[in-house]
Image: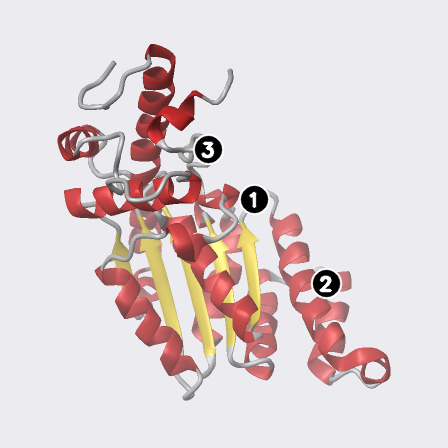
Amino acid sequence: MTNEYKLYGLTSNPFREASAEAMESIYLLHVNQKVDSELACIVGELSEGGRAIVAYVGELGIGKTERLRWLEEVAVKKGIFHIFLSVEQDYTFNIKKLFESGLKQINDKMGFFGRLRAPGYVKEIKKSLRQKKEPAELGTLASIMLKEQAPSYILLDNIDCGDNNFLDFLVSLVNNLKAGSLLCFTCNKEIFGGIREANPSFIERINKLYMLDGLTDKEAELLVAKRLAVSRSAQNMDPIFPFTREFICSLNSQVNGNPRALLKGMDDALSKACIAGVPLIAKSL
């Protein structure tokens, strides 16, 4: 297909990358909601000795991973110790990847001579991994690692995928989390309900629980405008052109405010409009 998108003052279709995993910059394309302002305050408190456990709960595509990616961006820009883990079903793989990420940052910070005199907790982590210690012991070691590197973030995406061993590790980590550390995790409502029933004390330790809602119509409009701006080649255009506000609101209602579903719908509508040569997208094609 030649670039029919120029009909709309665009260089390409900006809605193709619908997931947070595919985005290069979360900050530029993220639409702030109330929960984001609260999280920014929590992050600010960490440098003052705060400690926080945050959970994002919601359906696929509602924005859980996007918020973890935003925290990861913050950590990278500020040089903050952080671990981002997309949780898999294999417990051993999860633990290995989590500690490897942490130890690499510690080793890079210490340098060659520093590694020759590695602190005791680093040696203990390596020893425990070789000996395949119990999840609870490894959770405690993870909390010590975070404490020693504070301020520090540990970001666990989709704990839904984790097995019972990983949940035991997570409970231990939560129980031992120290000042200057942030633990943020995501899961769906069904898994969260199961954890709440099986381990209510774990849920009580969560400082901020966000049951994510969908986008309002105004937020949906802003999300569309931000995406279009990325590929906009012509100046002085309506930020949401070639879409009408009515179209965006109607589609947002159909997908119940789900950002990923909205972007996929916009992708489909723009592609079909290009093929048909429609000058303004006001209804489904």
Give how far across and how far down residue 143 sits, in percent.
54, 74
Q: Is residue 60 above or below residue 159?
A: above
Residue identifier under label 3: 11
Mark 2 and 1 residues: CB-CB less than 8 Å, in contact?
Answer: no
Q: Is residue 33 above or below residue 181?
A: above
Give how far across and how far down residue 262 sits, in percent.
29, 33
Q: Would residue 189 be visible to someone looking at this image?
A: no
Q: Residue furthest top?
A: 276
Say what amino acid the circle numbered 2 marks: Leu
SS under mark 3: loop
Residue identifier under label 1: 88
Say what amino acid the circle numbered 3 marks: Thr
- Pick whichever, 194 or 5, lies toward us: 5
**Quadrant hosting residue 48:** bottom left
Q: Is residue 6 left or right of residue 136?
A: left
SS under mark 1: loop
Q: Nearer the viewer, mark 2 or mark 3?
A: 3
Residue identifier under label 2: 129
Q: Is residue 245 left or right of residue 193?
A: left
Q: Residue at x 35, y 16 (%)?
A: 272
**Quadrant hosting residue 232:** top left
Q: Mark 2: give few (<14), some (14-19) or many (20+) Cα within 10 Å.
A: some
Identify the mark nearer the N-term, 2 or 3. Answer: 3
